[in-house]
Image (cartoon, helix red, strand yellow):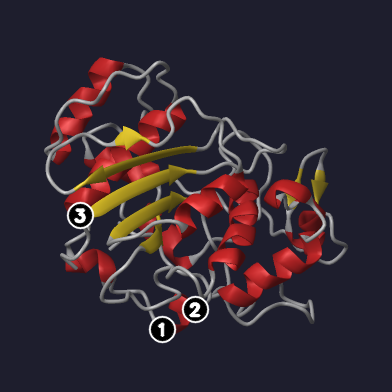
């Protein structure tokens, strides 16, 4: 997979509102130049990210820090007992879109408030669906594998409570993926074409630990540390930022990491990625 010439990482956000301060995009090309923020200082909307993605030309590999799907393999369904539970991930994206279609800014609150869907989620205010299992919740196969490999400490996408939860960003991301479907390949749900851009799911924390940061402290908040960890990916020092927040540095570091691993076949053919998983739960790029 040596064909990619440009790389980008997107730190995504499930926050409410028309624009999200938690979104950051960093991009770089082949070679050693450090990734740079796309539109530095701009507060992105989720729809602007969609338009940016659809406007890309050339051989881009784009990593998005969100989960495009939910657990399926453990019960043979996303939502066991619900007759509208889809058979695959594109069907899940379509279901989220259909229920949340009137919600602006690619929001998904109306989906988790749906009488049937809400039974499977843990929500704020002590609201826990009767089908949310005891403990941490349901996990995808790749999330179990990444934990076993010591790559990260994943959270269930059905858990919408707590600072580390990723469920909200994943659900808003599903509305974005519904709009990308058939227009921009998303691995592993789609085959990788011989040319053109491809989107993959990433965990920015995997990039951080690959750069040598401890798993418990993967956030970079200063220029010196950012340059130090970029050297792990043969990157030149970065252009100074006006603000060193987790979103910007996560995106910069992840883009540099993608550039170093995009050619590695083991990441494109994980041992436990079956054809069924590729259509239902998907996989996180970087988990072997």
* Tag 3 near tag 2, CB within 8 Å: no
Residue 161 vs residue 147, the one in the foreground = 161
Q: Which mark is residue 261?
A: 3
Residue 128 vs residue 226, the one in the foreground = 226
Q: Which mark is residue 132?
A: none
Badge 1: how crowded within 10 Å, few (<14), some, or many (20+)?
Answer: few
* Tag 2 near tag 1, CB within 8 Å: yes
The x, y position of residue 115, in whole percent, is 88, 63
Q: Residue at x 18, y 65 (%)?
A: 3
**Residue labelled with disc 1:** 275
Q: Tell me: 177 left or right of 6.
A: right
Q: Tell me: 259 left or right of 109.
A: left
Badge 2: how crowded within 10 Å, few (<14), some, or many (20+)?
Answer: some
How far separated are the C-alphas under marks 3 and 2? 23 Å
- Residue 151 visible? The answer is no
Q: Tell me: 257 left or right of 84.
A: left
Badge 3: how crowded within 10 Å, few (<14), some, or many (20+)?
Answer: some
**Residue labelled with disc 2:** 279
The x, y position of residue 272, in whole percent, is 34, 74
Relative height, residue 275 to residue 268 (above, below): below
Q: Tell me: 266 left or right of 78.
A: left
- Secondary structure under badge 2? helix
Q: Earlier in the sequence, mark 3 or mark 2?
A: 3
């Amino acid at each position: 997979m040596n064909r990619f010439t440009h790389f980008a990482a997107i730190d995504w956000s499930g926050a409410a509102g028309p624009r999200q301060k938690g979104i950051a995009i960093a991009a770089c090309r082949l070679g050693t130049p450090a990734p740079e923020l796309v539109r530095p200082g701009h507060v992105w909307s989720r729809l602007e990210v969609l338009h940016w993605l659809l406007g890309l030309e050339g051989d881009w590999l784009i990593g998005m820090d969100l989960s495009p799907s939910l657990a399926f393999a453990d019960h043979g369904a996303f939502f066991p007992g619900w007759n509208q539970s889809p058979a695959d991930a594109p069907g899940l994206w379509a279901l989220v879109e259909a229920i949340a279609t009137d919600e602006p800014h690619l929001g998904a609150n109306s989906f988790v408030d749906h009488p049937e869907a809400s039974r499977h989620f843990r929500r704020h205010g002590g609201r826990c669906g009767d089908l949310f299992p005891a403990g941490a919740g349901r996990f995808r196969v790749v999330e179990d594998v990444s934990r076993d490999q010591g790559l990260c400490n994943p959270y269930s996408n059905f858990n919408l409570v707590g600072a580390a939860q990723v469920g909200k960003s994943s659900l808003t991301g599903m509305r974005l993926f519904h709009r990308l479907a058939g227009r921009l390949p998303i691995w592993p749900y789609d085959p990788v074409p011989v040319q053109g851009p491809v989107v993959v799911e990433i965990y920015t924390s995997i990039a951080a630990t690959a750069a040598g940061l401890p798993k418990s402290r993967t956030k970079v908040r200063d220029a010196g540390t950012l340059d130090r960890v970029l050297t792990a990916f043969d990157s030149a020092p970065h252009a100074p930022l006006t603000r060193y927040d987790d979103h910007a540095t996560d995106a910069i570091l992840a883009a540099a990491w993608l550039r170093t691993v995009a050619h590695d076949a083991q990441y494109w053919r994980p041992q436990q990625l079956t054809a069924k998983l590729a259509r239902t739960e998907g996989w996180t790029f970087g988990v072997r």
